[in-house]
Image (cartoon, helix red, strand yellow):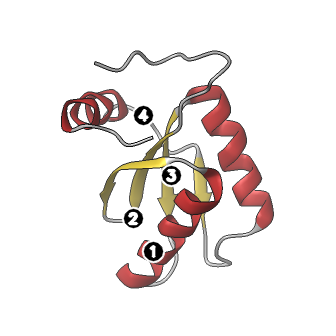
Amino acid sequence: MSLSNPQIRHLRGLAHSLKPVVMVGQHGLRESVLEEIGIALDFHELIKIKVSAGDRDERDKIIGNIVGQTGAERVQRIGNMAVLFRRNPKKPKIVLP
């Protein structure tokens, strides 16, 4: 699923007040962290994660791995924060424009 620019702007506005629900630390991306991200995406659809590992390139790789393995869309990345969106097909919560 590819998001259009108006949809991305809408999701960024919704994510502004969110707190990070998952934090990736110095030990990097583990299977348990991926499971938590998947559970959070199923429940919330739109989540903010904090990646506190390594430099910019390493954070980009970690976020890319998360997006690839969870099937989520990256909405925004600022510093060590990333906003991800994945529609719940059974119970959608967020209405996209």
Task: Determine whether label 2 and label 1 are within 8 Å by CB.
Answer: yes
Find disc 4 in the rendering and name its residue: 18
Which of the two labelled residues, at mark 4 and mark 2, occupies the earlier sequence position? Answer: 4
What element does badge 2 sit on?
A: loop
What element does badge 4 sit on?
A: loop
User: Residue 59 shows which numbered tag?
Assistant: 1
Which of the two labelled residues, at mark 1 and mark 3, occupies the earlier sequence position? Answer: 3
Find disc 2 in the rendering and name its residue: 80
Distance from disc 3 to disc 4, alpha carbons, whole Å, reads 10 Å
Indicate the quadrant containing the N terminus: top left, top right, bottom left or bottom right.
Answer: top left
Can you tell which quarter of the image residue 23 is in?
A: bottom right
Seen from this angle, which residue lies furthest right? 32
Amino acid type, callout 1: Arg
Amino acid type, callout 2: Asn
Find disc 3 in the rendering and name its residue: 49
Q: At which x and y percent is residue 86? A: 53, 37
What element does badge 3 sit on?
A: strand
Q: On the rendered structure, is 52 left or right of 56?
A: right
**28 in relation to 80, above or below:** below
Which of the two labelled residues, at mark 2 and mark 1, occupies the earlier sequence position? Answer: 1
Which of the two labelled residues, at mark 3 and mark 4, occupies the earlier sequence position? Answer: 4
Q: At which x and y percent is residue 26? A: 61, 78
